[in-house]
Amino acid sequence: SRGSCALLQFDHRQVSPPRCLRRSTWQPCGGCPSSSSVRTTRPKTFHCSRRAPRQSNTPQLCEGLRRAHGVPQVGLSTDIMDVMASDEMGKVLPRAQGYGDALPTDRRLCVDGSDVVAVREAAAYCIGEARAGKGPSVVEALTFRHGSHNVGQNLPESILSDDDREIRRKDPLFVLRGRLARLGGEESTLRAIDALTARAAAAVDAAETFARASPEPGLADLDAAVFSPPSFSPPRHAAAAAAASPQPPSGARERSFSEAIAEAHAVALRSDPRVVVMGEDIGEMGGVFQCTAGLTSEFGARRVIETPISEACIGGCAVGAAATGLVVPIVEVQIMDMVTLMMDNVVNQAAKWRLMLGGEAQRDAEGRSVSMPIVIRGPQGGGHRLSAQHSQSLEAWFTAVPGLKVVMPSTPHDAKGLLLAAVRDPNPVIFLEHKNLYQLPRSHVPDGDYEVPLGVASILREGTDVTLVATSNMVHEALKAAGRLAARKEQPVSVEVIDPRTLWPLDEATILDSVQRTSRLVIAHEAPRRGGWGGELLSVVQEKAFDYLDAPITIVAGRDCPLPYNAALEKACIPGAAQIAEACLAVVQRPGFDQ
Protein backbone atom coordinates (compact mmCIF):
# COMPACT_ATOMS: atom_id res chain seq x y z
CA SER A 1 0.00 0.00 0.00
CA ARG A 2 2.97 2.37 0.39
CA GLY A 3 3.24 2.57 -3.37
CA SER A 4 -0.39 3.30 -3.96
CA CYS A 5 -1.83 6.26 -5.76
CA ALA A 6 -5.40 7.50 -5.81
CA LEU A 7 -7.84 9.45 -7.92
CA LEU A 8 -10.53 11.36 -6.10
CA GLN A 9 -13.80 11.61 -7.97
CA PHE A 10 -16.48 13.77 -6.40
CA ASP A 11 -20.05 14.07 -7.53
CA HIS A 12 -21.27 17.64 -7.54
CA ARG A 13 -23.78 18.44 -4.80
CA GLN A 14 -27.23 19.70 -5.68
CA VAL A 15 -28.11 22.91 -3.90
CA SER A 16 -31.81 23.42 -4.40
CA PRO A 17 -34.88 21.17 -4.54
CA PRO A 18 -35.89 18.93 -6.09
CA ARG A 19 -32.52 17.29 -6.67
CA CYS A 20 -30.65 14.28 -5.39
CA LEU A 21 -27.90 14.33 -2.83
CA ARG A 22 -25.32 11.91 -4.10
CA ARG A 23 -22.32 10.66 -2.24
CA SER A 24 -18.75 11.06 -3.36
CA THR A 25 -16.52 8.22 -4.36
CA TRP A 26 -12.81 7.89 -3.88
CA GLN A 27 -11.66 5.21 -6.23
CA PRO A 28 -8.23 3.76 -6.95
CA CYS A 29 -6.86 4.86 -10.31
CA GLY A 30 -5.18 1.50 -10.99
CA GLY A 31 -1.90 3.24 -11.75
CA CYS A 32 0.18 0.89 -9.66
CA PRO A 33 -0.11 -2.65 -8.27
CA SER A 34 -1.28 -1.44 -4.87
CA SER A 35 -3.68 1.28 -5.93
CA SER A 36 -6.59 -0.74 -4.62
CA SER A 37 -5.28 -0.18 -1.11
CA VAL A 38 -6.55 3.40 -1.04
CA ARG A 39 -10.19 3.44 -0.12
CA THR A 40 -13.07 5.34 1.35
CA THR A 41 -15.96 4.39 3.58
CA ARG A 42 -19.30 5.78 4.57
CA PRO A 43 -19.59 7.36 8.01
CA LYS A 44 -21.88 4.60 9.27
CA THR A 45 -19.24 1.94 8.58
CA PHE A 46 -16.24 4.14 9.32
CA HIS A 47 -16.02 3.27 12.96
CA CYS A 48 -16.28 -0.48 12.29
CA SER A 49 -13.48 -0.26 9.75
CA ARG A 50 -11.26 2.28 11.48
CA ARG A 51 -8.81 -0.44 12.61
CA ALA A 52 -8.13 -1.65 9.07
CA PRO A 53 -5.76 1.13 7.97
CA ARG A 54 -3.64 0.72 11.10
CA GLN A 55 -3.40 -3.03 10.54
CA SER A 56 -2.53 -2.87 6.85
CA ASN A 57 -0.91 0.59 6.68
CA THR A 58 -3.65 1.51 4.24
CA PRO A 59 -4.77 5.09 3.63
CA GLN A 60 -8.42 5.58 4.39
CA LEU A 61 -10.75 8.53 4.15
CA CYS A 62 -14.24 8.77 5.53
CA GLU A 63 -16.42 10.44 2.93
CA GLY A 64 -18.13 13.40 4.47
CA LEU A 65 -19.84 15.17 1.59
CA ARG A 66 -23.21 15.84 3.11
CA ARG A 67 -23.27 19.65 3.01
CA ALA A 68 -22.92 22.59 0.64
CA HIS A 69 -21.71 26.08 1.54
CA GLY A 70 -24.67 27.14 3.67
CA VAL A 71 -27.21 26.33 0.96
CA PRO A 72 -30.00 23.81 1.71
CA GLN A 73 -29.45 20.41 0.11
CA VAL A 74 -32.01 17.85 -0.90
CA GLY A 75 -32.57 14.27 -1.84
CA LEU A 76 -35.09 13.89 -4.67
CA SER A 77 -37.41 16.20 -2.78
CA THR A 78 -36.42 16.29 0.90
CA ASP A 79 -34.42 19.14 2.39
CA ILE A 80 -31.45 17.65 4.22
CA MET A 81 -31.91 19.96 7.17
CA ASP A 82 -35.37 18.51 7.74
CA VAL A 83 -33.93 15.06 8.40
CA MET A 84 -30.49 15.77 9.94
CA ALA A 85 -29.82 15.95 13.66
CA SER A 86 -28.07 19.26 13.22
CA ASP A 87 -29.10 22.86 12.87
CA GLU A 88 -26.00 23.98 11.00
CA MET A 89 -24.75 23.02 7.55
CA GLY A 90 -21.21 21.75 7.08
CA LYS A 91 -20.81 20.33 10.56
CA VAL A 92 -19.90 16.71 10.01
CA LEU A 93 -16.39 17.06 11.39
CA PRO A 94 -17.32 17.74 15.04
CA ARG A 95 -18.84 14.27 15.17
CA ALA A 96 -15.34 12.87 14.77
CA GLN A 97 -14.40 14.25 18.18
CA GLY A 98 -15.78 11.04 19.67
CA TYR A 99 -12.66 9.23 18.48
CA GLY A 100 -10.50 11.45 20.68
CA ASP A 101 -6.75 11.07 20.23
CA ALA A 102 -7.28 8.31 17.63
CA LEU A 103 -8.54 10.98 15.23
CA PRO A 104 -6.92 14.29 16.22
CA THR A 105 -7.85 17.70 14.87
CA ASP A 106 -5.09 17.75 12.25
CA ARG A 107 -6.65 14.70 10.56
CA ARG A 108 -10.15 16.18 10.47
CA LEU A 109 -10.19 18.42 7.42
CA CYS A 110 -12.89 20.54 5.80
CA VAL A 111 -12.10 21.67 2.25
CA ASP A 112 -13.77 23.43 -0.63
CA GLY A 113 -14.96 20.52 -2.76
CA SER A 114 -15.13 22.84 -5.77
CA ASP A 115 -11.38 23.44 -5.62
CA VAL A 116 -9.59 20.51 -7.25
CA VAL A 117 -6.21 21.57 -5.92
CA ALA A 118 -7.47 21.95 -2.35
CA VAL A 119 -9.05 18.51 -2.47
CA ARG A 120 -5.88 16.97 -3.87
CA GLU A 121 -3.70 18.63 -1.24
CA ALA A 122 -5.98 17.43 1.55
CA ALA A 123 -6.00 13.91 0.19
CA ALA A 124 -2.23 13.87 -0.24
CA TYR A 125 -1.75 15.03 3.34
CA CYS A 126 -4.12 12.38 4.74
CA ILE A 127 -2.55 9.62 2.67
CA GLY A 128 0.86 10.66 3.93
CA GLU A 129 -0.35 10.57 7.52
CA ALA A 130 -1.85 7.08 7.00
CA ARG A 131 1.30 5.74 5.37
CA ALA A 132 3.30 7.08 8.28
CA GLY A 133 1.21 4.85 10.52
CA LYS A 134 -0.75 7.66 12.16
CA GLY A 135 -4.16 6.27 11.25
CA PRO A 136 -7.20 7.34 9.23
CA SER A 137 -8.53 10.80 8.45
CA VAL A 138 -11.88 12.42 7.82
CA VAL A 139 -12.27 14.90 4.98
CA GLU A 140 -15.44 16.91 4.59
CA ALA A 141 -15.58 18.41 1.10
CA LEU A 142 -18.28 21.00 0.56
CA THR A 143 -19.45 21.30 -3.03
CA PHE A 144 -22.51 21.11 -5.28
CA ARG A 145 -23.84 19.44 -8.38
CA HIS A 146 -25.52 20.60 -11.55
CA GLY A 147 -28.62 18.96 -12.91
CA SER A 148 -30.89 16.32 -11.49
CA HIS A 149 -30.15 12.86 -10.18
CA ASN A 150 -31.27 11.32 -13.45
CA VAL A 151 -32.88 12.35 -16.70
CA GLY A 152 -36.64 11.95 -16.67
CA GLN A 153 -37.09 11.71 -12.91
CA ASN A 154 -40.53 13.28 -13.37
CA LEU A 155 -40.07 15.98 -10.74
CA PRO A 156 -40.77 19.67 -11.22
CA GLU A 157 -37.88 22.03 -11.84
CA SER A 158 -37.08 24.29 -8.94
CA ILE A 159 -36.60 28.04 -8.99
CA LEU A 160 -33.01 29.04 -8.25
CA SER A 161 -32.42 31.41 -5.36
CA ASP A 162 -29.71 34.09 -5.38
CA ASP A 163 -27.63 31.84 -3.12
CA ASP A 164 -28.05 28.99 -5.59
CA ARG A 165 -26.84 31.14 -8.45
CA GLU A 166 -23.85 32.33 -6.46
CA ILE A 167 -22.87 28.81 -5.52
CA ARG A 168 -23.15 27.57 -9.10
CA ARG A 169 -20.58 30.15 -10.14
CA LYS A 170 -18.06 28.10 -8.13
CA ASP A 171 -17.85 25.39 -10.75
CA PRO A 172 -14.64 23.37 -10.19
CA LEU A 173 -13.43 24.21 -13.71
CA PHE A 174 -13.91 27.93 -13.12
CA VAL A 175 -12.13 27.73 -9.77
CA LEU A 176 -9.22 25.83 -11.32
CA ARG A 177 -9.00 28.30 -14.19
CA GLY A 178 -8.78 31.15 -11.69
CA ARG A 179 -6.02 29.37 -9.75
CA LEU A 180 -3.99 28.76 -12.89
CA ALA A 181 -4.47 32.32 -14.04
CA ARG A 182 -3.24 33.66 -10.70
CA LEU A 183 -0.23 31.37 -10.78
CA GLY A 184 0.70 32.34 -14.33
CA GLY A 185 -0.26 35.98 -14.20
CA GLU A 186 0.41 36.45 -17.90
CA GLU A 187 -1.62 36.58 -21.08
CA SER A 188 0.21 33.50 -22.31
CA THR A 189 -1.14 31.55 -19.33
CA LEU A 190 -4.71 32.44 -20.24
CA ARG A 191 -4.07 31.45 -23.85
CA ALA A 192 -2.68 28.12 -22.67
CA ILE A 193 -5.76 27.57 -20.51
CA ASP A 194 -8.02 28.39 -23.48
CA ALA A 195 -6.08 25.92 -25.60
CA LEU A 196 -6.53 23.20 -22.97
CA THR A 197 -10.24 23.96 -22.81
CA ALA A 198 -10.53 23.74 -26.60
CA ARG A 199 -8.67 20.42 -26.64
CA ALA A 200 -10.98 19.01 -23.98
CA ALA A 201 -14.06 20.20 -25.86
CA ALA A 202 -12.73 18.69 -29.09
CA ALA A 203 -12.15 15.35 -27.33
CA VAL A 204 -15.72 15.38 -26.01
CA ASP A 205 -17.09 16.28 -29.44
CA ALA A 206 -15.07 13.50 -31.06
CA ALA A 207 -16.35 10.98 -28.54
CA GLU A 208 -19.93 12.07 -29.17
CA THR A 209 -19.45 11.86 -32.95
CA PHE A 210 -17.98 8.37 -32.60
CA ALA A 211 -20.86 7.23 -30.38
CA ARG A 212 -23.53 8.57 -32.72
CA ALA A 213 -21.88 6.96 -35.74
CA SER A 214 -21.44 3.57 -34.05
CA PRO A 215 -24.01 0.83 -34.68
CA GLU A 216 -26.40 -0.08 -31.91
CA PRO A 217 -25.10 -3.04 -29.88
CA GLY A 218 -26.88 -6.36 -30.29
CA LEU A 219 -27.80 -9.09 -27.84
CA ALA A 220 -24.59 -10.94 -28.68
CA ASP A 221 -22.61 -7.90 -27.53
CA LEU A 222 -24.68 -7.76 -24.36
CA ASP A 223 -24.17 -11.43 -23.52
CA ALA A 224 -20.42 -11.18 -24.12
CA ALA A 225 -20.23 -8.28 -21.67
CA VAL A 226 -21.61 -10.21 -18.68
CA PHE A 227 -18.69 -12.59 -18.06
CA SER A 228 -15.04 -12.40 -19.03
CA PRO A 229 -13.99 -15.52 -20.95
CA PRO A 230 -11.85 -17.73 -18.68
CA SER A 231 -8.45 -18.93 -19.82
CA PHE A 232 -8.43 -22.64 -18.94
CA SER A 233 -5.22 -24.57 -18.41
CA PRO A 234 -5.57 -27.98 -20.13
CA PRO A 235 -2.75 -29.71 -18.18
CA ARG A 236 -4.34 -28.88 -14.85
CA HIS A 237 -7.75 -29.96 -16.08
CA ALA A 238 -6.32 -33.20 -17.39
CA ALA A 239 -4.88 -33.85 -13.95
CA ALA A 240 -8.25 -33.13 -12.41
CA ALA A 241 -9.99 -35.56 -14.72
CA ALA A 242 -7.54 -38.30 -13.82
CA ALA A 243 -7.86 -37.54 -10.13
CA ALA A 244 -11.67 -37.69 -10.35
CA SER A 245 -11.60 -41.45 -10.85
CA PRO A 246 -14.23 -43.07 -8.58
CA GLN A 247 -11.60 -45.57 -7.40
CA PRO A 248 -8.58 -43.65 -6.01
CA PRO A 249 -5.30 -45.55 -6.06
CA SER A 250 -4.30 -47.69 -3.11
CA GLY A 251 -2.73 -45.62 -0.36
CA ALA A 252 -4.04 -42.42 -1.95
CA ARG A 253 -3.29 -39.13 -0.27
CA GLU A 254 -6.22 -38.06 1.94
CA ARG A 255 -7.25 -34.68 3.31
CA SER A 256 -10.25 -33.23 5.14
CA PHE A 257 -12.51 -30.66 3.52
CA SER A 258 -10.88 -27.81 5.51
CA GLU A 259 -7.40 -29.03 4.66
CA ALA A 260 -8.32 -29.19 0.96
CA ILE A 261 -9.53 -25.58 1.06
CA ALA A 262 -6.35 -24.49 2.87
CA GLU A 263 -4.22 -26.29 0.25
CA ALA A 264 -6.08 -24.52 -2.54
CA HIS A 265 -5.36 -21.17 -0.88
CA ALA A 266 -1.67 -22.03 -0.61
CA VAL A 267 -1.39 -23.19 -4.23
CA ALA A 268 -3.14 -20.04 -5.44
CA LEU A 269 -0.89 -17.77 -3.38
CA ARG A 270 2.25 -19.52 -4.62
CA SER A 271 1.24 -19.55 -8.27
CA ASP A 272 -0.01 -15.96 -8.61
CA PRO A 273 1.55 -12.99 -6.78
CA ARG A 274 -1.68 -11.02 -7.26
CA VAL A 275 -3.68 -13.33 -4.98
CA VAL A 276 -4.44 -12.23 -1.42
CA VAL A 277 -6.68 -13.81 1.22
CA MET A 278 -8.86 -11.54 3.37
CA GLY A 279 -11.16 -12.15 6.30
CA GLU A 280 -11.76 -12.22 10.03
CA ASP A 281 -9.50 -14.38 12.22
CA ILE A 282 -7.79 -15.97 9.22
CA GLY A 283 -4.22 -15.36 10.42
CA GLU A 284 -2.72 -17.20 13.36
CA MET A 285 -6.10 -18.72 14.23
CA GLY A 286 -6.48 -20.11 10.71
CA GLY A 287 -10.16 -19.25 10.47
CA VAL A 288 -13.07 -20.62 12.47
CA PHE A 289 -13.06 -23.82 10.39
CA GLN A 290 -9.27 -23.90 9.80
CA CYS A 291 -9.57 -23.18 6.08
CA THR A 292 -6.62 -20.76 6.20
CA ALA A 293 -4.47 -22.68 8.67
CA GLY A 294 -0.74 -22.22 8.14
CA LEU A 295 -1.03 -19.51 5.48
CA THR A 296 0.27 -16.59 7.54
CA SER A 297 3.49 -18.40 8.47
CA GLU A 298 4.32 -18.97 4.78
CA PHE A 299 2.94 -15.87 3.09
CA GLY A 300 2.89 -13.20 5.78
CA ALA A 301 0.34 -10.67 6.91
CA ARG A 302 0.49 -8.61 3.70
CA ARG A 303 -1.03 -11.44 1.67
CA VAL A 304 -3.11 -13.09 4.38
CA ILE A 305 -4.92 -10.01 5.59
CA GLU A 306 -6.81 -10.00 8.87
CA THR A 307 -9.74 -7.60 8.78
CA PRO A 308 -12.02 -5.89 11.28
CA ILE A 309 -15.40 -7.40 12.07
CA SER A 310 -17.04 -5.36 9.32
CA GLU A 311 -18.26 -7.27 6.29
CA ALA A 312 -19.14 -3.99 4.58
CA CYS A 313 -15.53 -2.89 4.98
CA ILE A 314 -14.20 -6.26 3.77
CA GLY A 315 -16.46 -6.31 0.72
CA GLY A 316 -15.60 -2.76 -0.28
CA CYS A 317 -11.85 -3.36 0.02
CA ALA A 318 -11.96 -6.61 -1.92
CA VAL A 319 -14.18 -5.43 -4.75
CA GLY A 320 -12.16 -2.23 -5.09
CA ALA A 321 -8.95 -4.26 -5.28
CA ALA A 322 -10.35 -6.69 -7.84
CA ALA A 323 -11.63 -3.81 -9.99
CA THR A 324 -8.05 -2.83 -10.78
CA GLY A 325 -7.37 -6.28 -12.27
CA LEU A 326 -4.06 -6.17 -10.40
CA VAL A 327 -5.22 -7.94 -7.23
CA VAL A 328 -7.14 -11.22 -6.94
CA PRO A 329 -8.83 -11.32 -3.53
CA ILE A 330 -10.14 -14.49 -1.90
CA VAL A 331 -12.56 -13.29 0.77
CA GLU A 332 -13.52 -15.56 3.64
CA VAL A 333 -16.89 -14.62 5.08
CA GLN A 334 -16.72 -16.12 8.55
CA ILE A 335 -20.41 -17.11 8.46
CA MET A 336 -22.04 -16.71 5.06
CA ASP A 337 -25.22 -15.22 6.54
CA MET A 338 -23.16 -12.06 7.13
CA VAL A 339 -22.67 -11.62 3.40
CA THR A 340 -25.83 -9.53 3.61
CA LEU A 341 -23.61 -6.70 4.86
CA MET A 342 -21.48 -6.74 1.71
CA MET A 343 -24.28 -7.35 -0.80
CA ASP A 344 -24.16 -3.83 -2.25
CA ASN A 345 -20.55 -4.34 -3.32
CA VAL A 346 -21.14 -7.91 -4.48
CA VAL A 347 -24.43 -7.45 -6.34
CA ASN A 348 -24.39 -3.82 -7.47
CA GLN A 349 -20.67 -3.49 -8.15
CA ALA A 350 -18.80 -6.77 -8.70
CA ALA A 351 -21.54 -8.54 -10.67
CA LYS A 352 -22.14 -5.56 -12.96
CA TRP A 353 -18.64 -4.13 -13.27
CA ARG A 354 -17.71 -5.66 -16.62
CA LEU A 355 -21.01 -4.89 -18.31
CA MET A 356 -21.20 -1.30 -17.11
CA LEU A 357 -17.61 -0.59 -18.19
CA GLY A 358 -18.12 -1.79 -21.74
CA GLY A 359 -17.36 -5.49 -21.53
CA GLU A 360 -15.14 -6.94 -24.22
CA ALA A 361 -15.00 -3.64 -26.11
CA GLN A 362 -13.28 -1.84 -23.21
CA ARG A 363 -9.60 -2.72 -22.93
CA ASP A 364 -6.64 -1.27 -21.07
CA ALA A 365 -3.27 -0.25 -22.47
CA GLU A 366 -2.08 -3.87 -22.39
CA GLY A 367 -5.12 -5.11 -24.29
CA ARG A 368 -6.88 -6.73 -21.31
CA SER A 369 -10.65 -6.53 -21.20
CA VAL A 370 -12.56 -5.46 -18.11
CA SER A 371 -12.65 -8.16 -15.42
CA MET A 372 -13.53 -8.62 -11.75
CA PRO A 373 -11.38 -11.50 -10.42
CA ILE A 374 -12.68 -12.13 -6.91
CA VAL A 375 -13.80 -15.17 -4.90
CA ILE A 376 -16.13 -14.79 -1.92
CA ARG A 377 -16.22 -18.02 0.05
CA GLY A 378 -17.45 -19.23 3.41
CA PRO A 379 -19.64 -21.63 5.39
CA GLN A 380 -23.41 -21.80 5.21
CA GLY A 381 -26.18 -24.21 6.17
CA GLY A 382 -27.73 -25.61 9.33
CA GLY A 383 -27.40 -28.57 11.64
CA HIS A 384 -25.18 -26.97 14.27
CA ARG A 385 -27.72 -25.18 16.44
CA LEU A 386 -26.44 -21.78 15.34
CA SER A 387 -30.03 -20.56 14.97
CA ALA A 388 -31.74 -18.49 12.32
CA GLN A 389 -29.09 -15.86 11.61
CA HIS A 390 -26.14 -18.22 11.23
CA SER A 391 -27.67 -21.24 9.48
CA GLN A 392 -29.15 -20.09 6.18
CA SER A 393 -28.56 -21.56 2.72
CA LEU A 394 -28.40 -18.55 0.40
CA GLU A 395 -27.35 -19.94 -2.97
CA ALA A 396 -30.59 -18.92 -4.70
CA TRP A 397 -29.88 -15.25 -3.96
CA PHE A 398 -26.66 -15.41 -5.92
CA THR A 399 -27.87 -17.54 -8.84
CA ALA A 400 -30.52 -14.86 -9.43
CA VAL A 401 -27.85 -12.22 -10.10
CA PRO A 402 -26.43 -12.15 -13.65
CA GLY A 403 -22.68 -11.66 -13.51
CA LEU A 404 -22.00 -13.99 -10.57
CA LYS A 405 -20.77 -17.57 -10.76
CA VAL A 406 -21.92 -19.85 -7.94
CA VAL A 407 -19.99 -22.92 -6.74
CA MET A 408 -21.08 -25.53 -4.16
CA PRO A 409 -18.56 -28.35 -3.69
CA SER A 410 -19.45 -31.50 -1.76
CA THR A 411 -16.11 -33.34 -1.43
CA PRO A 412 -12.55 -32.40 -0.42
CA HIS A 413 -11.29 -33.30 -3.90
CA ASP A 414 -13.77 -31.01 -5.60
CA ALA A 415 -13.35 -28.27 -3.02
CA LYS A 416 -9.64 -27.88 -3.81
CA GLY A 417 -9.99 -28.14 -7.58
CA LEU A 418 -13.05 -25.90 -7.81
CA LEU A 419 -11.51 -23.22 -5.58
CA LEU A 420 -8.39 -23.08 -7.75
CA ALA A 421 -10.56 -22.81 -10.87
CA ALA A 422 -12.58 -20.07 -9.20
CA VAL A 423 -9.50 -18.06 -8.25
CA ARG A 424 -8.24 -18.22 -11.83
CA ASP A 425 -11.58 -17.25 -13.31
CA PRO A 426 -11.64 -13.52 -14.22
CA ASN A 427 -15.20 -13.15 -12.90
CA PRO A 428 -16.73 -12.83 -9.41
CA VAL A 429 -17.34 -16.29 -7.94
CA ILE A 430 -19.44 -17.13 -4.87
CA PHE A 431 -18.03 -20.27 -3.24
CA LEU A 432 -20.41 -21.85 -0.71
CA GLU A 433 -19.28 -24.52 1.76
CA HIS A 434 -21.74 -26.33 4.01
CA LYS A 435 -20.57 -26.50 7.61
CA ASN A 436 -21.18 -30.25 7.80
CA LEU A 437 -18.61 -30.82 5.06
CA TYR A 438 -15.81 -29.72 7.37
CA GLN A 439 -16.61 -32.81 9.46
CA LEU A 440 -16.49 -35.32 6.60
CA PRO A 441 -14.02 -38.19 6.88
CA ARG A 442 -10.79 -37.56 5.02
CA SER A 443 -10.82 -38.61 1.39
CA HIS A 444 -8.62 -38.60 -1.70
CA VAL A 445 -7.15 -35.19 -2.59
CA PRO A 446 -4.28 -35.08 -5.10
CA ASP A 447 -1.13 -33.20 -4.20
CA GLY A 448 -0.11 -30.07 -6.06
CA ASP A 449 -2.00 -27.92 -8.54
CA TYR A 450 -5.14 -29.07 -10.31
CA GLU A 451 -8.48 -27.56 -11.28
CA VAL A 452 -12.02 -28.87 -11.50
CA PRO A 453 -13.59 -26.76 -14.25
CA LEU A 454 -16.61 -24.65 -13.41
CA GLY A 455 -19.82 -25.71 -15.13
CA VAL A 456 -19.11 -29.45 -15.19
CA ALA A 457 -21.36 -31.75 -13.14
CA SER A 458 -20.25 -35.03 -11.58
CA ILE A 459 -22.20 -38.32 -11.82
CA LEU A 460 -21.43 -39.92 -8.46
CA ARG A 461 -23.59 -43.02 -8.90
CA GLU A 462 -25.09 -44.41 -12.07
CA GLY A 463 -28.70 -45.56 -12.18
CA THR A 464 -31.60 -46.31 -14.49
CA ASP A 465 -34.85 -45.61 -12.61
CA VAL A 466 -34.59 -42.01 -11.38
CA THR A 467 -32.21 -39.06 -11.63
CA LEU A 468 -31.40 -37.48 -8.26
CA VAL A 469 -29.69 -34.07 -8.40
CA ALA A 470 -28.40 -32.89 -5.02
CA THR A 471 -26.24 -29.98 -3.91
CA SER A 472 -23.53 -29.57 -1.26
CA ASN A 473 -24.26 -31.53 1.95
CA MET A 474 -27.41 -33.04 0.41
CA VAL A 475 -25.14 -34.96 -1.98
CA HIS A 476 -24.13 -37.21 0.90
CA GLU A 477 -27.73 -37.65 2.01
CA ALA A 478 -28.62 -38.49 -1.61
CA LEU A 479 -25.93 -41.17 -1.78
CA LYS A 480 -27.22 -42.70 1.46
CA ALA A 481 -30.76 -42.72 0.04
CA ALA A 482 -29.57 -44.28 -3.22
CA GLY A 483 -27.78 -47.03 -1.30
CA ARG A 484 -30.86 -47.82 0.75
CA LEU A 485 -33.05 -47.94 -2.34
CA ALA A 486 -30.68 -50.23 -4.20
CA ALA A 487 -30.53 -52.58 -1.19
CA ARG A 488 -34.31 -53.16 -1.00
CA LYS A 489 -35.09 -56.87 -1.17
CA GLU A 490 -38.28 -56.22 -3.07
CA GLN A 491 -38.53 -53.79 -5.95
CA PRO A 492 -35.14 -52.11 -5.55
CA VAL A 493 -34.71 -48.72 -7.18
CA SER A 494 -31.69 -47.77 -9.27
CA VAL A 495 -30.87 -44.10 -8.64
CA GLU A 496 -28.44 -41.96 -10.63
CA VAL A 497 -26.93 -39.31 -8.31
CA ILE A 498 -25.60 -36.10 -9.86
CA ASP A 499 -23.72 -33.33 -8.10
CA PRO A 500 -23.91 -30.18 -10.26
CA ARG A 501 -20.94 -28.71 -8.33
CA THR A 502 -21.58 -25.29 -9.88
CA LEU A 503 -25.09 -23.86 -9.89
CA TRP A 504 -24.02 -21.27 -12.41
CA PRO A 505 -22.78 -21.97 -14.95
CA LEU A 506 -24.98 -25.08 -14.85
CA ASP A 507 -24.11 -28.30 -16.68
CA GLU A 508 -27.56 -28.71 -18.20
CA ALA A 509 -26.38 -31.29 -20.73
CA THR A 510 -25.36 -33.89 -18.11
CA ILE A 511 -28.61 -33.51 -16.17
CA LEU A 512 -30.85 -33.55 -19.24
CA ASP A 513 -29.07 -36.61 -20.65
CA SER A 514 -29.66 -38.45 -17.38
CA VAL A 515 -33.34 -37.47 -17.23
CA GLN A 516 -33.83 -38.65 -20.79
CA ARG A 517 -32.53 -42.07 -19.72
CA THR A 518 -34.37 -42.40 -16.40
CA SER A 519 -37.54 -40.39 -17.23
CA ARG A 520 -37.77 -39.15 -13.63
CA LEU A 521 -36.16 -36.39 -11.59
CA VAL A 522 -35.84 -35.64 -7.87
CA ILE A 523 -34.01 -32.50 -6.69
CA ALA A 524 -32.63 -32.18 -3.16
CA HIS A 525 -31.27 -29.09 -1.42
CA GLU A 526 -31.26 -27.79 2.14
CA ALA A 527 -32.52 -24.29 1.36
CA PRO A 528 -36.27 -23.69 1.68
CA ARG A 529 -38.30 -24.85 -1.29
CA ARG A 530 -39.95 -21.47 -1.83
CA GLY A 531 -37.68 -19.51 -4.12
CA GLY A 532 -35.02 -22.22 -3.89
CA TRP A 533 -32.57 -23.18 -6.63
CA GLY A 534 -34.49 -26.42 -7.22
CA GLY A 535 -37.29 -24.44 -8.83
CA GLU A 536 -34.84 -23.11 -11.42
CA LEU A 537 -33.60 -26.60 -12.29
CA LEU A 538 -37.17 -27.85 -12.42
CA SER A 539 -38.06 -25.19 -14.99
CA VAL A 540 -35.04 -26.06 -17.13
CA VAL A 541 -35.90 -29.78 -17.23
CA GLN A 542 -39.61 -29.17 -17.66
CA GLU A 543 -38.92 -26.95 -20.65
CA LYS A 544 -36.21 -29.01 -22.33
CA ALA A 545 -37.04 -32.63 -21.43
CA PHE A 546 -40.80 -32.65 -20.83
CA ASP A 547 -41.51 -35.35 -23.39
CA TYR A 548 -39.14 -37.73 -21.59
CA LEU A 549 -40.78 -37.41 -18.15
CA ASP A 550 -42.94 -40.23 -16.83
CA ALA A 551 -43.66 -38.56 -13.48
CA PRO A 552 -43.85 -35.06 -12.00
CA ILE A 553 -40.53 -33.58 -10.92
CA THR A 554 -40.17 -33.62 -7.13
CA ILE A 555 -38.19 -31.21 -4.95
CA VAL A 556 -37.00 -32.25 -1.47
CA ALA A 557 -36.07 -29.09 0.38
CA GLY A 558 -35.85 -27.40 3.75
CA ARG A 559 -38.90 -26.21 5.59
CA ASP A 560 -40.08 -22.70 4.71
CA CYS A 561 -39.05 -21.12 8.00
CA PRO A 562 -35.92 -19.70 9.66
CA LEU A 563 -33.96 -22.52 11.26
CA PRO A 564 -34.69 -22.69 15.02
CA TYR A 565 -32.18 -23.11 17.84
CA ASN A 566 -34.02 -26.13 19.30
CA ALA A 567 -32.14 -29.24 18.15
CA ALA A 568 -35.20 -31.41 17.45
CA LEU A 569 -36.97 -28.64 15.54
CA GLU A 570 -33.86 -27.79 13.53
CA LYS A 571 -33.47 -31.44 12.54
CA ALA A 572 -37.11 -31.58 11.48
CA CYS A 573 -36.58 -28.58 9.18
CA ILE A 574 -33.63 -30.05 7.28
CA PRO A 575 -34.27 -32.91 4.81
CA GLY A 576 -32.23 -36.09 5.01
CA ALA A 577 -31.77 -39.47 3.37
CA ALA A 578 -35.18 -40.76 4.52
CA GLN A 579 -37.14 -37.94 2.87
CA ILE A 580 -35.06 -38.22 -0.30
CA ALA A 581 -35.61 -41.98 -0.50
CA GLU A 582 -39.37 -41.58 -0.06
CA ALA A 583 -39.45 -38.99 -2.83
CA CYS A 584 -37.62 -41.36 -5.18
CA LEU A 585 -40.05 -44.17 -4.36
CA ALA A 586 -42.97 -41.87 -5.03
CA VAL A 587 -41.81 -40.91 -8.52
CA VAL A 588 -41.25 -44.56 -9.47
CA GLN A 589 -44.63 -45.43 -7.88
CA ARG A 590 -43.33 -48.10 -5.54
CA PRO A 591 -44.28 -48.70 -1.87
CA GLY A 592 -42.35 -46.88 0.82
CA PHE A 593 -40.15 -48.41 3.49
CA ASP A 594 -42.99 -48.45 6.02
CA GLN A 595 -45.32 -50.52 3.83
Image (cartoon, grey):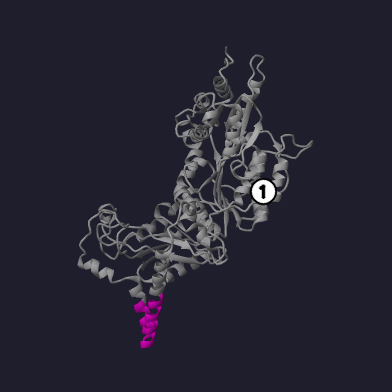
The image shows residue 471 at horizontal and vertical percentages of: 57, 34
The image shows residue 22 at horizontal and vertical percentages of: 35, 58
Q: Which quadrant of the figure has residue 101?
A: bottom left
Quadrant for the C terminus in the image: top right
Query: The disc labelled 1 sits on which kind of residue?
Result: Gly
In the image, taking residue 381 as reference, residue 78 lies left or right, namely left
Residue beneath disc 1: 294
Q: Residue furthest right?
A: 250
Report the front residue among 85 and 174. 174
For residue 429: magenta?
no
Q: Which residues are magenta?
A: 177-199
The image shows residue 556 at horizontal and vertical percentages of: 52, 27
Going 58% across and 22% down the picture, which residue do you hit? Answer: 581
Going 46% across and 48% down the picture, which residue do you hit? Answer: 347
Q: Is residue 57 above or below residue 533?
A: below
Count the marks.
1
For numbered disc 1, what is the local secondary structure? loop
Estimate how packed mark 1 is, as few (under 14), some (14 to 19) or many (20 or more) residues with alpha carbons within 10 Å.
some
**Most common SS among magenta residues:** helix
The image shows residue 335 at horizontal and vertical percentages of: 53, 41
Q: Which quadrant of the figure has residue 407?
A: top right
* Residue 571 visible in image: yes
Report the front residue among 562 and 220. 220
